[in-house]
Image (spheres, rainbow, N blue to C red):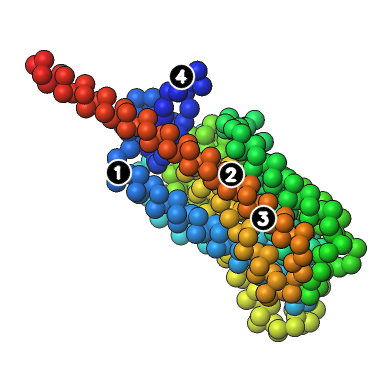
Amino acid sequence: MRLWIDMGDAGEIRMQIAGPSRGVANNGTSPATAAPPTMSERVQWWAVVLVNIVFLLGGQSVASFLGRIYYDQGGGSLWMATVVQSCGTPLAIPLLLYFRRRPRSTAVTRPPLLKISAIYAGLGVLLAADNLMYSYALLYLSLSTYSLICATQLSFNAVFSYFLNKEKFTALILNSVVLLTFSAALVGVSHGSDGTNSSVPEGKFPLGFALTLTASALFSLILSLMQLTFDKVLKSDTFYDVVEMQFWSNTAAAVVSVAGLFISGEWSSLDGEMDGYKKGKVAYGMTLAWTAISWQLATVGMMGLVAAVSSLFTNVISTVGLPLSPIVAVIFFGDQMDGVKVLAMLIGVWGFLSYIYQHYLDDAKVKKILAERLADDDEHQTVKLNTE
């Protein structure tokens, strides 16, 4: 259920309050004539959103933390670090089997298999490339620096959402984009202060910075393309659709990553890498396993938020961990947190709050319009009863 509201010259704008489907109401009516969401439906929707937020933030934070530990404890295979970001897809099979038994809405026409397969394969290739760049970036940068640069995802996604998903570009969102870009620029020009106890290679900061920035842009593009797929191709955002996209796109990414692992020849050094792991073979296996599980939870949360709200909102939520990651990196990895990094973090938080405030204003506007519409309906019903 989505609430659509006609806002004059702005045209018909979708205000995402709650709902199980895109563009089609539960009774098959058009969005413009769909009934307003009930309180129970709104609470249910918010519960789903909150669960996805927990999955995204928890999975993303744990996966980044374990990824840095993998390198620090003796892991060095970039392709293995890439594989674990997408190889946890079998975890989604029970969910696919369970939700496939549920009846699907007859108002939604399933797109051709060849078309949807090509889309999932394309998303998978992009995900594999993005995962590889993130693997290099996490190797070449300290966790605190890596986290601060990743916040630029919001800036890139605001631009992609404007062109691909027709998102509004308000003054507050523009302010957020500028601040987050400035925050990343501060980190980029102060690379000499990137001190850490982690095993970060010397002289690799420029490459790490460029790869993180490129990966952030590509990740934002992927989110916008996912939203475009839900809106224009699937025309549905049920939990089954979310899990299906997560499963097949990540399966494609895993296939590409495993192929890269064998083509590069890194697979032949994995036995030696396991033997040389500082914490032992069991810790090596557990680190990779829990990294894979964490990334899958993050992916389910990410796609769930894209389907339920928008790609831009998803990126905003993913940057919530911005103030925490540098602090965690200082405590556990001995990262140096100088004045420039603190300033960059504060500017990034300011940019994040600017976007959150814009969402607050949008939500308040929708609630006001909804209240007025309900009041008009009540008045209309009263007049009708009186005339009868």
From the image, tell me which residue sits under label 3.
Answer: 346
Crowdedness of circle 1 by 10 Å Cα count: few (<14), some, many (20+)?
few
Give the residue at the far top of this rendering. Answer: 387
Q: Which image quadrant: the N terminus?
A: top left
Spatial distance from mark 4 to mark 2, Cα to Cα?
26 Å
Does residue 283 show up? yes
Image location (x, y in percent) of residue 218: 71, 45
> Which amino acid type corresponds to the residue marked 1 in the rendered image?
Met
Q: Is residue 379 left or right of residue 240?
A: left
> Residue 172 or 62: which is nearer the viewer?
172
Q: Residues within 10 Å of mark 2 (few under 14, many from 20)?
A: many
Name the kind of residue labelled 3 in the image. Leu
Q: Residue at x 73, y 50 (%)?
A: 183
Asked if marks 1 and 3 touch (Cβ < 8 Å), the reply is no
Q: Is residue 245 above or below residue 62?
A: above
Residue 181 location, quadrant: top right
